[in-house]
Image (cartoon, helix red, strand yellow):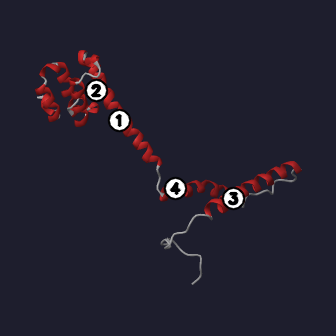
């Protein structure tokens, strides 16, 4: 029954060349053609056909002589397909659309926004005196951070082309009516 689950094209190769296929080779092809037998190691119809042709035209003599070598080739074929699918998925995952890029930037802005808003109400009343060095370090750090924010605003955000039609604004407007 297992043998009937195989690709019809690979069956034609068996019938036309019965002496090229041993029972073990046929069993390996059948098991790897059935989703219930080898589960994740299932061959596609195209792969079944290629492997049957591989046995007909012995590209590797070991696979014809040794069924274990043939089964390793079957698993290698499936692994190659899986690896290609994984790489394709990774490539697609890296390709972000415009909305994703903007959403990521806005999410990234949440942390500095919270930190900057916490700076304004910070209470320095308990500080009686500060050394000149510490004061300059704090000022330099604040100015450096403000320069980074200003450069992002001027170099990256302001050069973005604006859409032809305005987006629908959600929420209240700051303008008075």
Residue at mark 4 to residue at mark 2: CA–CA distance:
41 Å
Disc 3 is placed on an element classified as helix
Q: Nearer the viewer, residue 10 or 132?
A: 10
Q: Residues within 10 Å of mark 2 (few under 14, many from 20)?
A: many
* Left or right: 138 as drawn, with respect to 95: right
- Residue at the extreme bottom of the image, as rendered: 177
Residue matched to label 4:
101
- Residue 167 at x, y = what percent? 49, 71
Q: Do the residues labelled 1 and 2 touch (CB within 8 Å)?
A: no
Helix, strand or loop for disc 2: helix
Mark 4 vs mark 1: which is more N-terminal?
A: 1
Which quadrant of the figure contains the C terminus?
bottom right
**In this orientation, which residue lies closer to the viewer: 93 or 58?**
58
Determine whether 91 is above or below 30 in the image. below
**Which part of the image, by quadrant, shows the N terminus?**
top left
- Name the disc covering residue 74, or none: 2
In space, the residues marked 1 and 3 are separated at their CA atoms by 44 Å
> Which residue in the structure is indicated by mark 1?
82
Q: Which mark is residue 5?
A: none
Alpha carbon of mark 4 to alpha carbon of mark 1: how far? Answer: 29 Å
Q: Mark 3 points at which residue?
A: 151
Give the residue displayed 29% in from the left and 32% down from the top.
40
Secondary element at image label 1: helix
Residue 78 pos. (x, y %): 31, 31
């Amino acid at each position: 029954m297992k043998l009937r689950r195989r690709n019809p094209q690979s069956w034609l190769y068996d019938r036309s060349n019965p002496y090229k296929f041993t029972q073990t080779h046929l069993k390996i092809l059948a098991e790897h053609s059935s989703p219930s037998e080898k589960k994740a190691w299932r061959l596609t119809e195209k792969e079944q056909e290629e492997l049957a042709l591989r046995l007909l035209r012995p590209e590797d003599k070991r696979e014809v002589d040794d069924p274990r070598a043939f089964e390793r080739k079957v698993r290698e074929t499936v692994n190659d397909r899986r690896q290609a699918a994984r790489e394709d998925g990774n490539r697609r995952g890296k390709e972000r659309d415009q909305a994703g890029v903007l959403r990521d930037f806005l999410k990234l802005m949440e942390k500095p926004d919270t930190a900057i808003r916490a700076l304004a109400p910070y209470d320095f009343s308990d500080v009686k005196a500060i050394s000149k060095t510490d004061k300059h370090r704090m000022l330099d750090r604040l100015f450096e951070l403000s320069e980074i924010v200003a450069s992002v605003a001027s170099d990256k955000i302001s050069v973005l082309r604006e859409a032809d039609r305005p987006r629908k604004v959600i929420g209240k407007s700051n303008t008075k009516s």
